[in-house]
Image (cartoon, rainbow, N blue to C red):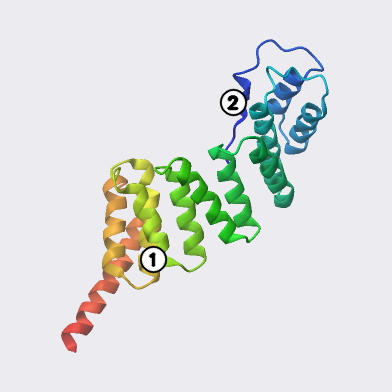
Amino acid sequence: MVRHSVVVISELVGGMEYDTPEEWFKLAFEAEYPEEKIEYFDLILECETRNPELWSDEAIALIWNNKGIAYTFMGMYRESLECFEISLDLNKNDIDVWYNTGVTLFQLGRFEEAIKCYNRILTIDSRNDNAWINMGDVLEYMGRHNEAIECYSKVHKEIELDSKFAIVWNKKGLVYFGIGLYEDAAECFSKVLNIDPENTEAIEHLRIAMEEVKKKNNRLIRA
């Protein structure tokens, strides 16, 4: 999922007047449909009378980011990628935009480039959990299971009991299950249930993993 930066700009603007970039931004934020948002963002970007003290390169970069997000909601990934690239030209260290670029590149099937985006985030913030998770998802999709497991492991190494990371244990368990490491898979699903005992998906996965472990042990006994 793409990450929004709308609130960041909304904190910068004070009183609003009609037909100003500040008012257009407010209207874009309130607009229900992405097409409307794009129209207001374009008005801001095309305006020649923007206050340079308010509309710095960083603020304009956020406008491009949010325009890209609007295109993403419309499934127009090439257009959204162009917006994110312009945003990064203006502010190369915006983690949210690198994240959005990675998500969009994945949608376009450009997996290696998506991985580079998440690696770029990690050079800025080595403990960025979203980057580790998304990179793991891309690697798993590419069939690079061991590398995916390494990424997921980076996430919960120090925060194993945080409830929001139950999904990461489940992802890791599914990778282990997919490559036939059922004992490791069962351990991961057990971790999920320690955090979220009512997680029905993990309960079912644990049951199946344990059955596979039992079958494996029976085969060893008969051998």
Mark 1: amino acid: Asn
In the drawing, does residue 114 fall left or right of residue 124?
Answer: right
The one of 137 and 124 positioned closer to us in this rendering? 124
Query: Which marked residue is nearer to the observer: mark 1 or mark 2?
Result: 1
Can you give x and y, in whole percent of width and height, for residue 188 in the image?
30, 57
Measured in 3D between alpha carbons, the distance from the residue under mark 1 to the one under mark 2, in whole angstroms, is 38 Å
In the drawing, does residue 128 fall left or right of residue 82?
Answer: left
Asked whether the viewer can see residue 1, the reply is: no
The one of 112 and 193 positioned closer to us in this rendering? 112
Can you give x and y, in whole percent of width and height, for residue 117 in the image?
55, 50
Mark 2: amino acid: Val
Residue at (48% x, 62% y) in the render: 139
Q: Which residue is mark 2?
A: 7
Q: Which residue is mark 1?
A: 146
In the depicted structure, whether residue 106 falls above or below residue 142: above
Report the residue that reaches farthest toward the top: 15
For the N terminus, the image quarter is top right
Asked whether the viewer can see residue 50, the reply is: yes
Residue 90 quadrant: top right
In the depicted structure, whether residue 22 falls above or below residue 41: above
Name which of mark 1 and mark 2 comes first in the sequence.
Answer: 2
Residue at (46% x, 45% y) in the render: 123
For the C terminus, the image quarter is bottom left
Q: Residues within 10 Å of mark 2 (few under 14, many from 20)?
A: few
Q: Secondary structure at mark 2?
A: helix
Can you give x and y, in whole percent of width and height, for residue 175 in the image?
40, 64
In the depicted structure, whether residue 9 falls above or below residue 143: above
In the drawing, does residue 191 fall left or right of residue 27?
Answer: left
Can you give x and y, in whole percent of width and height, for residue 43 in the image?
81, 28
Q: Secondary structure at mark 1?
A: helix
Q: Are marks 1 and 2 in contact (CB under 8 Å)?
A: no
Total marks placed: 2
